[in-house]
Amino acid sequence: MSKKSAAAQAPADQGELWATLKKAVEDHQSTASYCCGGTVAIDASPAPASLKTAGQVSPGSTTKSPPVALRWDVKEAGEARTIHFPQASLVSKNTRSSSTSSQPSLLEQLLESCAPATFGRKNKDILDESYRKAGKLNRSQFSVDFHPHDYGIIDTISQVLLPQVDVDFMKGREQHRGVMAELYKLNVYSGPSGKFRAHVDTPRGATQFGSLVVCLPHPHEGGHLRVTHAGHSKHFDWSNAKATTIQWAAFYSDCEHEVLEVTSGHRVTLTYNLYVTESVGKILHPHPCADLKSFPLYQEVKQLIEAPIIFEAGQKLGFHCQHQYAHTRDGIEELMPFTLKGIDAIVFGVFQALGLKTTVKPRLQNQDYEDEDDHGHEYVGDKLYGLVTDWNSGWERDPEEERLHLNQVWPSNKTRNVTWLNDPTNSGWEMAYVGMTYGNEASLSFKYSHAIILIDVPEAEKNVSE
């Protein structure tokens, strides 16, 4: 959508804008993370880095993949063949590639080795090319030297999709869950009529929660992957002429999806089944292979934020984190925002990608000493603090003195003009401060905080990034 058309549909005033944005975020709290996707660049240099070397790149940089080698069994020949993606014409300098003249025949042999792809219906495998027209190789018939774990794809799925998975496996130990990707099939959708009509996959086990599709770099047109959940659709357009990147998408098992018709070329994909498994660790930062524009929330927020409205100085947006992070434990400040997950990670990433200053802060629960001067204000901590214990806080104080004292031990800013995009969760409030005061008798004072994502609204007429 162009900026001109976006502006034409923009809300008329600031109040309407915030109401529309709040509704968009609320609507997407259950749908924003039903799918994710991204790209992995191809390294066609003569001596591609080993995976060990590639893992040593600086944070935020992109790990590249060498051309992908696919080996498969040739029917009735008792032999195997190897083809590289992309084709040799694009990676002729790479010593791992075959000659240009041999590659077309290898592709033809691959197509000949593929069986017609079926689909499941009522526990039966159905062959109907009006519904699905594609070729397939089963897992036992091929091997490939690409694995999604090596390029941060599984880490991204763990951060975005896994937190919403509701299965009995490891109930109560969700923080120890991980993702296993099981290679399932190779599929080739060929132009001009390769397709797979809308359908929903049947999980292959109690712990399967989704699917991952990896599109190997080969020229084709059409063949968009459409994923739909709760009335919202996301299109992954992998059509290309040069085929210089590996592209991928992951989505939940209950999502309807389809492969639109391939008009030319060959769309070659690897499909993985995604399972919940026991994890030995957690990721600490989002991986650059993930494309934030693939999240359904991105375009809606982009259109609304670009609305031609003059915002009030100091205007902020606030989002209460929907997951628990033990945000009052010592050391949590160094882990944020890298440990955000699910909708929290998406909200933070989307607004940050659109050029807005986005931070994770603690919001103090409404204080008992607020007065009329505090109306419309929030007390937001300067940073995430560990639990503050104040056993010698002195004698009882009046509300103003109490506020000044608390600000000394739990520094905060009196923030106004915060538009909240959602409500806090009951489980999100954690004890932030406990102090003992003295009067006729000693008494304890408790304060609670909630982890929030705070977004600074851009100044008037300042465009956000594309």
Image: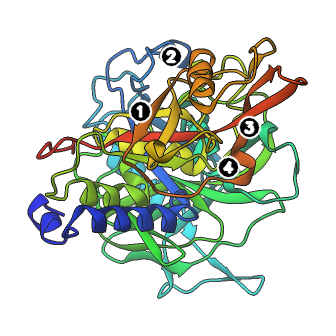
Report helix, strand or loop for mark 2: loop
Type of the residue with mark 4: Leu
Mark 1 crowd level (few <14, some 14–19, many ≥20, 10 Å Cα): many
What residue is rendered at 75% in x and 87% in y? Answer: 122
Measured in 3D between alpha carbons, the distance from the residue under mark 1 to the one under mark 2, in whole angstroms, is 12 Å
Type of the residue with mark 3: Glu
Q: Which residue is mark 1?
A: 67
Mark 3 crowd level (few <14, some 14–19, many ≥20, 10 Å Cα): many
- Where residue 427 sits in the image (x, y, percent)? 75, 49
43 left or right of 278? left
Q: Which residue is mark 2?
A: 50
Instruction: Using the image, determine if residue 155 lies above or below residue 199.
Output: above
Q: Are marks 4 and 3 in contact (CB under 8 Å)?
A: no
- Where residue 233 sits in the image (x, y, percent)? 43, 71
- Where residue 3 sits in the image (x, y, percent)? 13, 59
**Label of residue 430 in the image:** 3
Q: Which residue is mark 4?
A: 162
What residue is rendered at 45% in x and 15% in y? Answer: 57
Instruction: Using the image, determine if residue 428 lies above or below residue 423.
Output: above
In the depicted view, which residue is nearer to us: 416 or 194? Answer: 416
- In front: mark 2 or mark 4? 4
Mark 2 crowd level (few <14, some 14–19, many ≥20, 10 Å Cα): few
Report helix, strand or loop for mark 1: loop
Marked residue nearer the N-terminal end (4 or 3): 4
The quadrant of the picture occupied by the C terminus is top left
Type of the residue with mark 1: Pro
Type of the residue with mark 2: Ser
What residue is rendered at 35% in x and 26% in y? Answer: 43
In the depicted view, which residue is nearer to us: 351 or 420? Answer: 420
